[in-house]
Image (cartoon, helix red, strand yellow):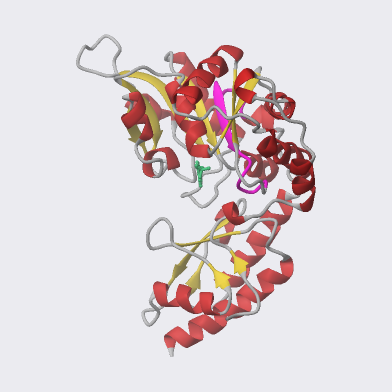
Amino acid sequence: MPDRTIDLRSDTVTHPTPAMREAMYGAELGDDVYGEDPTVNRLEELSAERLGKEAAVMLLSGTMGNLVGILAQTRHGDEAIVGAHSHIFLNEAGGPAALGGVQLHTVPTQRGVMTPDAVEGALRDPRNLHHPRSTLVCIENTHNRDGGAAVPVQAMDTVADVAHRNGLRVHVDGARLFNAAVALDVPIARLVRGADTVQFCLSKGLGCPAGSLLVGDAAVIQEARRWRKMIGGGLRQSGIIAAAGVVALEQMVDRLAEDHRNAKRLAQGLNSIPGLVVDVDAVDTNIIMLDVDDQRVDPKSFVARLREQGVKIGSPYGPRIRLVTHYQVTSDDVDFTLRAAEHALDLVAA
Ligand SMILES: Cc1ncc(COP(=O)(O)O)c(C=O)c1O
């Protein structure tokens, strides 16, 4: 057994910080289904304020936040435009179709960005009886499968303009939205100014054990609360979870820059090892996509050899290897990982 473990599979593997555990222990609680949990109320107010929107509702997960966001803004038979590599399309178990009767229409993304032409090209004709109704566009920022790409403000605004001009609403899957705002050095409220709803996760780079927020105007959040209840997401003393979320928003946002620096250095180091290829310039945030370019090396064996040395990585989305930095990965862990990668490659190529 290795005496050290570095878990780079995802930023979801993080454990709550000591400050979060303390806040959870001491959290003031009530019944949130009655709207009486002061800690949940505080987190929701803080979230809405940070994102420059009227209201927010806490949900258990990013998947639940996206689902409820979509359900609250569509009707059965509608169509939502989403990125072809988006988490909503690929990794949320078909929830919008299964539970909302919502068909997803995919458009390509390049580093998370949808072109206005692609969005316009996907719009259905509202007068044509053969067509479903286009009612929503979903943007993912940062874009997970596109390598943690931070979608710039202008690209967000452009898509929102096209959507609104055509009577559609805009939902942002911001599972890692704070990473995007930090990487782009733009106030988070500005980044999502054009969005009608935004889902962001507490349980990824921000280090919480669970929880997501859906923010938007008061009416859409009220509708989202109804859907949350319907799918069994109405919780009682959920201030236990919200307490960690408040700590996350107050203490864990600015430090994301450190994860981005670690990711960049890890990317540079990996790319300098013959046989490993990373597009270093494409590393905007905490996600690195790695390719093995050596005929002798089977990527699966490389991953297995790294694991023997205590470095956990994975290929959640096909042949490319993904590495994710987070607050439990130190600069020293980056050095260790680079040495381990070199060693693993030697062993597998031998
Ligand atoms: C971009 C994106 N959206 C949504 C989710 C779903 O979040 P959860 O795992 O909390 O349901 C994830 C999870 O990794 C994600 O990467």
- 310 over 236 or under it: above or below: below
107 sits to left or right of 305: left
Identified at 50% across, 18% down, the residue is: 226
Quadrant of the rendered image containing residue 26: top right
Identified at 69% across, 33% down, the residue is: 239
Which of the pair 117/44 is nearer the observer? 44
**Range of magenta residues:** 192-206
Count of numbered badges drawn on the protein: 0
- 281 over 49 or under it: above or below: below
Which of the pair 350/152 is nearer the observer? 350
Residue 138 drawn at (x, y percent): 46, 30
Residue 203 drawn at (x, y percent): 61, 45
Picture quarter with the C terminus: bottom left
Residue 307 drawn at (x, y percent): 52, 74
Identified at 63% across, 31% down, the residue is: 191
Identified at 64% across, 33% down, the residue is: 238
The reply to whether residue 238 is in sight is yes
Which residue is most to the top? 127
Q: Is residue 280 magenta?
A: no
Residue 117 drawn at (x, y percent): 39, 29
The reply to whether residue 283 is in sight is no
Quadrant of the rendered image containing residue 25: top right
Picture quarter with the N terminus: bottom right
Which of the pair 37/252 is nearer the observer? 37
Which residue is most to the bottom? 350
- 55 over 156 or under it: above or below: above
Overall secondary structure of the magenta stretch? loop
Q: Is residue 194 magenta?
A: yes
